[in-house]
Image (spheres, grey):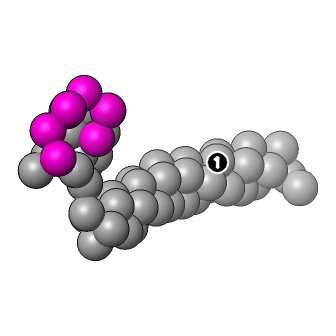
Amino acid sequence: MGEHLMALKWLGNEGSHSSKKSKVIERSQLLEALDILEYVLEAIFDSRSKKIAKAARTINKKKGL
């Protein structure tokens, strides 16, 4: 996942700190960045919700619910 976030960092830096026209981020790069961001967010929150659901099941089972 670190590699994914690093790619977003590079594109963000290029888009915000570059003054050369040759360094402008292309539309295709922006769309790829959005795909990467969506993937990372899904990976983070989906795994978190699975962990939380498992923890809730474990607690309920131990408490006899």
Point 28% across, 72% down: residue: 28
Find residue 14 and report its horizontal and vertical position in percent. 20, 39
In which quadrant is the C terminus drawn? bottom right
Give the camera-side residue of 64 and 8.
Answer: 8
**Residue 3 shown left or right of residue 62 in the figure:** left
Per the image, the residue denoted by label 1 is 52
| Chain part drawn in magenta | 15-21
Point 10% across, 50% down: residue: 22
The verdict on residue 26 being magenta is no
The verdict on residue 17 being magenta is yes
- Asked if residue 33 is positioned above or below residue 48 in the image, the reply reads below
Give the camera-side residue of 27 and 4.
Answer: 27
**Residue 30 shown left or right of residue 9 in the figure:** right
Asked whether the viewer can see residue 49, the reply is yes
Point 55% across, 52% down: residue: 45
Q: Residues within 10 Å of mark 1 (few under 14, many from 20)?
A: few
Find residue 25 and report its horizontal and vertical position in percent. 25, 54
For the residue labelled by badge 1, is the local secondary structure a helix, a strand or a loop?
A: helix
Find residue 6 and report its horizontal and vertical position in percent. 19, 40
**Residue 51 shown left or right of residue 18 in the figure:** right
